[in-house]
Image: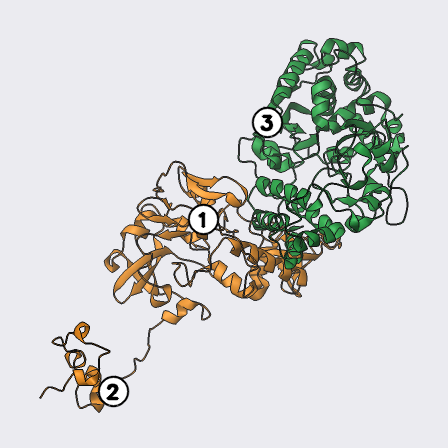
Chain colours: A green, B orange
Amino acid sequence: MGRKLLLEKAQVEGIRTYEVYRREGGYASVEKALKTMSPDQVTEEVKKSGLRGRGGAGFPAGMKWSFLAKPEGVPRYLVCNADESEPGTFKDRYLMEFIPHLLIEGLIVASYALGSERTYIYIRGEYAWIVDILEEAIAEANKAGFLGKNILGSGFNCQIYVQRGAGAYICGEETALIESLEGKRGNPRIKPPFPAVKGVWDCPTVVNNVETLAAVVPIIRIGGEEYAKIGVGKSTGTKLISACGNINKPGVYEIDMTISVEEFIYSDEYCGGIPNGKRLKACIPGGSSVPILPANLLLKTAKGEQRMMNYESLADGGFATGSMMGSGGFIVLDEDQCVVRNTLTLARFYRHESCGQCSPCREGTGWMEKILKNIETGKGKMSDIDLLWDIQRKIEGNTICPLGDAAAWPVAAAIRHFRDEFEWHVKNPVESQHRNFGLAHYADPLPVPVTA
Amino acid sequence: MAEEKKLFKVTIDNITIEVEPGTSILNAARMIGGDVAPPAMCYYSKLKGSGGKCRTCLVEVAAGSTADPRPMPKLVASCRTNVMDGMVVKNITSERVIDARNGVVEFLLINHPLDCPICDQAGECHLQDLSYDHGKEGTRYEFNRRTFKKHDLGPYIQLHMTRCILCYRCVFTADQLTNKRVHGILDRGDHAEIATYIEKSLDNDFIGNVIDVCPVGALTDKTFRFKNRVWFLKPVDAHCECTKCKGKVTLWYRGEEVFRVTARKDQWGEVEDWICNECRFEKKKTSDWIIEGPTAVSRQSVISQGHYQHLEMPKETMPEVMGGRQPRLLMDIHSVSEVNRPDVDLSALPGPAHSTDFPKQS
């Protein structure tokens, strides 16, 4: 049983309310930080913890905080990125819905460290009901004196505002989020300048993901060094994984990043194996934008070592034989699933969500979707596969924001690892239309791991 | 004594130049000039915040600076990346850059027809130049192109969205030059489009400048479009006393007639001074202007083809040879009535017509 830091009290009845949360030890980190620590000490503690941003990029959070410019007489802002829109990722929703005070507490501590007196939660428009939950929690925290003026007599003032997005995936990108928060069209900005220098209303700003900010609470409670002992290497602390697809127990799990991928998929504590005894075909381990991995490379690295559920191990081998931890959206595909269809679904999503600012992303994502649709519907040509490869290659790295990469990587990985499945579609246009099975011939025999 | 300003040394395509801190790679390359300057479809030095979108100006930074000589992992937009001291940049000397730029041209041409023979921008189109330099002879795109219903933008400006490459220049222009912007980008992704809110017309005082900044033929001048091709026109610099703008323009003549008025442009195709609608659309007579002289046009430009100043017209020799007769007489072998006389009813003939059906008249 792994250590739980974020979801430890998630099952406590009534934990959503301030009263129960406080009774269970809530807001102790705010008290500790504001009464016994300076803002710089809080930042130092987060640095010591080795906490990496949980939104997908995995950049060290403490270092990001330390980049914040601190000019005299200019306000600074903390923005919580709750625009969780990546297909397969739904961990922040769980956190905000069931333990909203954990996020509020983390926000107060982080705001104190960063000197943000006005802090925003930018939340995905589709999470409409969670807005009410958060606003209720904010009102309760206000009433209890944890928000407002001169919090706990420390002289620190802070207020939290909830801002609803309009349901655009691109607004999860930090600069597009800032644009949207300012009331403009959610187009990514060109960096530099980075938000730490010029963010919301041209003021220094830190944008952190919900899970990252929630993790600040246990870091302050147990100390950065203690937090860093959990996990392995540079993957410190615990990580929320939203698991879905062909598994017996879809849901949000908190892991301490020392378990193997095999254990995560097959053990009863987590995903509980694959339904109906089917075999594992592939997995997208970190949300839809990261490269898909076939079963053999998912369970073991190219060097033959066991693949672990942490940042380093999942990325081992680069994109040739590895993938990414990303945002922790763990999507499992069993032997019946069609990779071509799956890739088309993702390509359709990224085409629809491209903001249209830069030409490779605007035109390339639509082109990829059309070719994939042709292949999927039996109208494809063999040369389409190479063309698809070339298009993704010309999108990747050449766009303003990472959405271009997010659209290119799934296509690249699907062709790299499942090219014969694309070819089968081209060669068998009729059969590919009337089937409800996936291709398993390419990796037979597939590894059938022993249940943990 | 004034403190000496520190300059940054930057090497672009093996040519080293010293520039002021804060200069972008693109502008440093423009100082060197020639092919070293990357192409730019969306960047416009006169428009704040422009650039970074089209990705045609991507370059490779082989060394970040003297202090940190590591190369940048990705290609960067040269229009939005400032030089650092000791930076080494590769533009046309980088295969990665050429490959990426080929890709960008291919993407841009997906939804931009190469209809140069009928497009009003032909001869002045930056995308046309770019596709000649970096494009392929064919396209790999086999799907339907984006189509749009035509927008009427008022009496002066015509929008052809099918040719738009969404460079945002016109939006920046309207934002920064006019007092009330009424057009912008609607929708997103490959279905994004330039449009006005509920079919409004663009009639702000300086809105005509959107025509000059448009790198392709999406926004054209209704008072000029399709009246002539630019290489048939003679550009002449002129000015006038204008209360709204500096009144420095280029008049485009054919014979004695002013076909259009535009702002003057520099060697990068950017306007030198914005002009008002009145100068652009209303003053189409020579008497409205004080003529300065012919505009300097690059020899490489197609517009230079229309420079018929000092051109010696070939002598008409036919009348001389033919003893004063007009050449059309050469074609006057016989009149039409001799070939197909109206008094012969062809449909009444039993078979195909024959020379015997047309007896020579005495």
Question: On the rendered structure, is B94 left or right of B256?
Answer: right
Which residue is label 2 attached to? B317
Question: On the rendered structure, is A406 left or right of B294?
Answer: right
Which of discs 3 and 2 lies nearer the camera? The answer is: 3
The chain holding disc 1 is: B
The residue positioned 53% from the left and 34% from the top of the image is A184
Q: Quadrant of residue A145?
A: top right
The chain holding disc 2 is: B
Residue B253 in the image: state x and y as whole percent.
30, 64
Instruction: Please rate how many residues cluster around mark 3, counting C-alpha atoms within 10 Å: few if below 14, some from 14 to 19, many from 20.
Output: some
Q: Nearer the viewer, residue A435 or B280?
A: A435
Is the residue A248 above or below the residue B206 in the image?
A: above
Residue B241 in the image: state x and y as whole percent.
30, 51
The residue positioned 66% from the left and 12% from the top of the image is A142
Q: Nearer the viewer, residue B134 or B345?
A: B345
Q: Amino acid at mark 2?
A: Thr
Instruction: Report the disc number at residue A125.
Output: 3
The residue positioned 76% from the left and 17% from the top of the image is A30
Q: Amino acid at mark 1?
A: Thr
Instruction: Please rate how many residues cluster around mark 2, counting C-alpha atoms within 10 Å: few if below 14, some from 14 to 19, many from 20.
Output: few
Q: Secondary structure at mark 1?
A: loop
CA gap, disc 2 to disc 1? 52 Å
Question: On the rendered structure, is A312 left or right of B135?
Answer: right
Instruction: Please rate how many residues cluster around mark 1, counting C-alpha atoms within 10 Å: few if below 14, some from 14 to 19, many from 20.
Output: few
Residue B311 in the image: state x and y as whole percent.
33, 77
Is residue A115 in sight in this rendering? yes
Q: Nearer the viewer, residue A114 or A412?
A: A412
| Labels 3 and 1 within one chain | no
Residue B274 in the image: state x and y as whole percent.
40, 50
Which residue is label 1 attached to? B147
CA gap, disc 3 to disc 1? 31 Å
Which of discs 3 and 1 lies nearer the camera? The answer is: 1
